């Protein structure tokens, strides 16, 4: 089959599917549909067709697109139209995860497979409710048991719905911890002596910004550059001369 003949079938499959479809699944489905044909399509042909379909729906003419997300290909509404589509299903898309659930989900995503005990050790609180809510929302699933730990506790991993929800194809697509921390890094604040002085004092100390600590533990501008301290010294000299015996 030519690519121009394959493309409509791929679009129909993606549109009708209730879950993201992989290229391999499309190859099997189309070949099963046209089993009587001698020339069967292959994975390379489907992948080339998907690239064309993806490019086609990137046009501004369409309010939706075909992208690979959640482990397969699917039609998704483009971001500018999200607010409109939200009203179609009411509160379904407006409900958000609690902070506790997000913390639990993040731990599972980065530590999977992980037991509930390990989750609670990291969080420092009981996580029964959060784990249950994530299971109900089908964002996580039970993948087995840890045979090495006492009691063989259940192991939790993220689900395909999780990947679909966050627009990734596998846990490997999650941002690295170092990248997240780098984005949150804040430059150090540089404190200058003039920040603690009024405008008049700042003008008199422009020649230097050296700070000294006297015997009483007070912060002072260096006497050598402080006109005020010089005046005080002159005054003390005058007083000493007045008090000295003739």
Image (spheres, grey):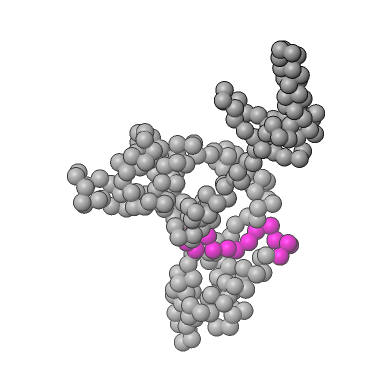
Residue 123 percent across, percent down from the top left: 39, 38
Q: Residue at x 39, y 44 (%)?
A: 135
Tell me which segment is drawn in magenta: 59-72
- Residue 96, can we see it? yes
- Residue 157, can we see it? no
From the viewer's side, name the closer residue of 150 and 24.
150
Q: Residue at x 21, y 47 (%)?
A: 149
From the viewer's side, name the closer residue of 133 and 213.
213
Residue 53 percent across, percent down from the top left: 62, 70
Residue 144 percent across, percent down from the top left: 28, 52
Q: Residue at x 69, y 51 (%)?
A: 80
From the viewer's side, name the closer residue of 9 and 230.
230
Left or right of residue 209, residue 39 in this image: left
Q: State the quadrant of the C terminus.
A: top right
User: What is the quadrant of residue 245 in the picture?
Assistant: top right
For the view shown, which residue lies furthest in the bottom direction? 38
Please say if 102 is above or below 111: above
For the view shown, which residue lies furthest in the front direction? 246
Left or right of residue 82, residue 13 in this image: left
User: What is the quadrant of residue 91 in the picture?
Assistant: top right
User: What is the quadrant of residue 223 in the picture?
Assistant: top right
Residue 79 percent across, percent down from the top left: 65, 53
């Amino acid at each position: 089959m030519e690519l121009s003949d394959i493309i409509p079938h791929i679009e129909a499959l993606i549109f009708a599917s209730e879950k993201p479809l992989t290229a391999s699944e499309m190859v099997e489905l189309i070949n099963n549909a046209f089993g009587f044909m001698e020339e069967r399509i292959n994975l390379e042909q489907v992948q080339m067709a998907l690239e064309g379909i993806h490019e086609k729906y990137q046009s501004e003419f369409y309010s939706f697109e075909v992208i690979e997300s959640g482990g397969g290909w699917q039609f998704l509404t483009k971001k500018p139209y999200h607010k409109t589509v939200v009203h179609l299903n009411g509160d379904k898309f407006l409900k958000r995860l609690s902070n506790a659930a997000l913390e639990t989900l993040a731990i599972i995503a980065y530590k999977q497979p992980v037991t509930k005990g390990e989750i609670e050790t990291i969080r420092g609180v009981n996580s029964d409710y959060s784990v249950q809510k994530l299971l109900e929302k089908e964002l996580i699933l039970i993948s087995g048991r840890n045979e090495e730990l006492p009691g063989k506790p259940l192991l939790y991993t993220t689900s395909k719905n999780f990947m679909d929800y966050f627009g990734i194809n596998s846990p490997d697509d999650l941002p690295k911890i170092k990248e997240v921390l780098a984005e949150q890094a804040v430059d150090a604040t540089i404190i200058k002596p003039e920040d603690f002085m009024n405008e008049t004092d700042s003008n008199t100390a422009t020649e230097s910004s050296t700070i000294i600590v006297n015997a009483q533990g007070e912060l002072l501008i260096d006497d050598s550059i402080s006109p005020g301290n010089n005046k005080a010294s002159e005054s003390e000299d005058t007083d000493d001369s007045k008090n000295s015996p003739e």
